[in-house]
Amino acid sequence: MDPRTRYTKYIITEVFLDFLKDKPLNRITVTDICKKAKINRGSFYKYYKDVYDLMEQLQDEGIDELKSMLEKLDASSGSAVKEVLLHVLSVIKSRKSLIDAMNVNRRIGEDAFLDRMMQCVLEYIQNMISIDKKLGEDPEIIEKKIMVSQYMLGGCSNLIMNWINTGMKMDEDILVTYMLEFTNQSKEDCHVRYMNEHVM
């Protein structure tokens, strides 16, 4: 991307996010953005169809960054899940202005953005599980792993949303440690319950 293009997209984004702090998305116009950014409408339409396309592209960039990070991870690593969750938080924090704007303006898809990221994580974890399946792991264990991953990510989504709503103040590493501790405790509780009901 050449410097001029980079600057134009940067100033459009900054002005757009600034407007989102005070206005609903459907009340922000291309004219508003161009006037404040001091660019012509042609420059805006060169990259975006409208303000909704701009919002979607900003979210897509975050998803693409997360996917790129996940592709570089070693799925066989014992710390892979922790690294995945840290990457999710890193992408969110690097887009704090976007998240804050969506948080103020709740109707424009903050939850959907987080859902898309967690779906990427679920697909990554399921890919890890499919590797275990190819290696001949017990189908019943595979099924339990899938259910645990879905359960875990549901809880993680709520914790991440709370982290966002409280200003992302907690250190990411501590938050992920809590997530994994809660998940492990839940798995242990389920195992004890299963043993009590079917073995003892």
Image: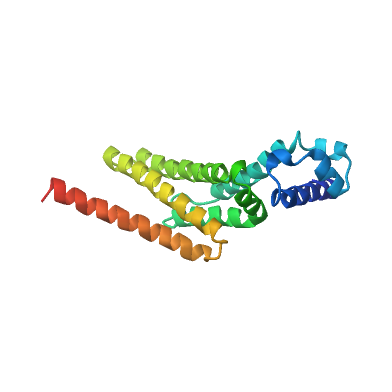
- Judging depth in this view, the residue of 22 and 35 nearest the camera is 22
Residue 94 image offset from top left, x and y in percent = 64, 56
Identify the coloring: rainbow
Q: Residue furthest left?
A: 200
Question: Residue 54, relative to residue 37: is it above or below?
Answer: above
Residue 132 image offset from top left, x and y in percent = 37, 43
Question: Residue 190, relative to residue 107: is it above or below?
Answer: below
Residue under the point 66% across and 51% down: 101
Count how many numbered circles sit on residues in the image. Answer: 0
Q: Quadrant of residue 45?
A: top right
Residue 141 image offset from top left, x and y in percent = 29, 43
Residue 107 makes an appearance in the image: yes
- Judging depth in this view, the residue of 33 and 119 nearest the camera is 33
- Judging depth in this view, the residue of 164 and 82 nearest the camera is 164
Question: Residue 200, relative to residue 126: is it above or below?
Answer: below
The answer to whether residue 153 is left or right of residue 51 is: left
- Judging depth in this view, the residue of 169 and 173 nearest the camera is 169
Residue 183 image offset from top left, x and y in percent = 36, 55
Q: Residue furthest top?
A: 49
Q: Quadrant of residue 25?
A: top right
Residue under the point 37% across and 60% down: 181
Residue 46 makes an appearance in the image: no
The answer to whether residue 152 is left or right of residue 5 is: left
Residue under the point 41% across and 56% down: 78
